[in-house]
């Protein structure tokens, strides 16, 4: 990593020992970004990255589905990135710079938020590398397609509006949307929206969602895509969400059949004394990176 960035703290995902997860030898690099300045309901997502990493130390390294230990090494965790005090645009630019460095070094970038506005940073880095030759897969309860919100176009409620201006977008799990966003969807003829109430009884939605994607895919996961019964620790919860296995079915198929170029998990808002949401987020990242490593034939120890 060539540039100087503002970092703080250091903890390794899964508690991996330093010697097995150096930056140089790792295939995937995790960037924690504790930021939530545009949060519009419940604040606290700035605590999400550290909660995920802390919970990850209790994840067993053996994957029952893969029948091996795919992540004994090869995952480097950067220190937390200091937000830019000038506002969301500055922080997004700072994230973009780090992700660009990770991409230049030939590694898979993984960002842990923080709020969803941060996703624009990795997307801008991807555009610099791939142009518009990739799709963004968004798992979310909200469309995030407002042109602006609370006097900024870089709000968490506007992030996918900025994304869809540049690259194709497929949205899964959406179940809360404003009238203005719906008008935008209709005006743009944005058909790649898999509404939560429609996929609830569908048998083919996973295949249909995958069909909309280009070969290269960036995945962004707002944890409120899950039903609040299993993921209550989010800033903007919404009933009627997806369950664990439905999300995994889609994500693992995407990683198996497409080229994953980056991913993020955002919007964990930890609840003191309630640890299972933190663990769910950590286990989700473990599952996705494990599948990615197996598909890339990095290693998988029995």
Image (cartoon, rainbow, N blue to C red):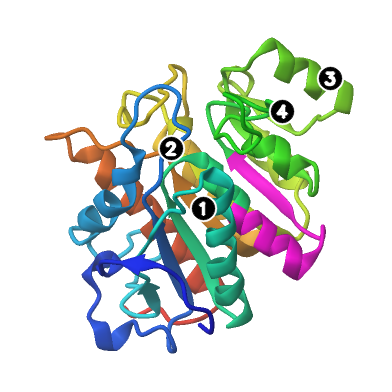
Quadrant where the C terminus is found in the figure: bottom left
- Mark 3 vs 4, N-terminal side: 4
- Mark 2 vs 4, N-terminal side: 2
Residue identifier under label 2: 37
Q: Residue 280 is drawn in which quadrant?
A: top left
Residue identifier under label 1: 91
Q: In this view, does 53 lie to the left or right of 27?
A: left
Give the percent coordinates (x, y) of residue 41. 40, 22
Residue 160 appears in view: yes
Would you say the residues marked 3 and 4 are in contact, meaning their CB atoms lie under 8 Å apart? no
- Mark 1 vs 3, N-terminal side: 1
In the image, residue 283 sits, relative to residue 299, either above or below, namely: above
Instruction: Name the residue: 53% across, 69% down.
Output: 98
Which residue occupies the foreground of this view, 92 or 284?
92
Would you say the residues marked 1 and 2 are in contact, meaning their CB atoms lie under 8 Å apart? yes
**Magenta extent:** 121-138
Residue identifier under label 3: 186
Give the percent coordinates (x, y) of residue 289. 45, 64
- Residue 35 magenta: no
Residue 147 — which label?
4
Alpha carbon of mark 1 to alpha carbon of mark 4: how far? Answer: 19 Å
| Dot 1: element | helix
Please identify, in this view, whether the residue under mark 1 or under mark 4 is nearer the observer.
1
């Amino acid at each position: 990593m060539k540039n100087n960035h503002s970092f703080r703290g250091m903890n390794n995902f899964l508690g991996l020992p330093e010697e097995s997860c150096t930056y140089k030898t790792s295939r995937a690099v995790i960037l924690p970004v504790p930021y939530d300045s545009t949060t519009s309901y419940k604040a606290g997502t700035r605590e999400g990255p550290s909660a995920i990493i802390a919970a990850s130390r209790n994840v067993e390294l053996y994957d029952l589905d893969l029948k091996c230990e795919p992540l004994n090494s090869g995952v480097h965790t950067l220190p937390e990135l200091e937000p830019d005090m000038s506002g969301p645009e500055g922080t997004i630019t700072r994230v973009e710079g780090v992700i660009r460095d990770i991409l230049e070094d030939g590694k898979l970038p993984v960002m842990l938020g923080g709020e969803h506005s941060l996703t624009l940073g990795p997307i801008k880095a991807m555009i610099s590398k791939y142009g518009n030759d990739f799709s963004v897969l968004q798992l979310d309860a909200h469309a995030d397609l407002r042109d602006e919100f609370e006097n900024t176009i870089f709000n968490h409620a506007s992030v996918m509006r900025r994304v869809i201006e540049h690259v194709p977008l497929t949205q899964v799990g959406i179940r809360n949307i404003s009238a203005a966003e719906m008008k935008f969807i209709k005006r743009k003829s944005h058909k790649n929206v898999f509404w939560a109430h429609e996929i609830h009884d569908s048998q083919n939605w996973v295949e249909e969602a995958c069909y909309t994607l280009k070969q290269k895919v960036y995945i962004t996961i707002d944890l409120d895509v899950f039903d609040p019964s299993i993921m209550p620790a989010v800033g903007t919860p919404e009933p009627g969400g997806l369950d664990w296995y439905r999300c995994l079915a889609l994500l693992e198929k995407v990683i198996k059949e497409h080229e994953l170029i980056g991913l993020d998990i955002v919007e964990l808002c930890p609840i003191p004394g309630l640890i299972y949401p933190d663990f769910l987020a950590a286990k989700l990242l473990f599952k996705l990176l494990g599948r990615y490593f197996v598909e890339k034939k990095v290693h998988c120890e029995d």
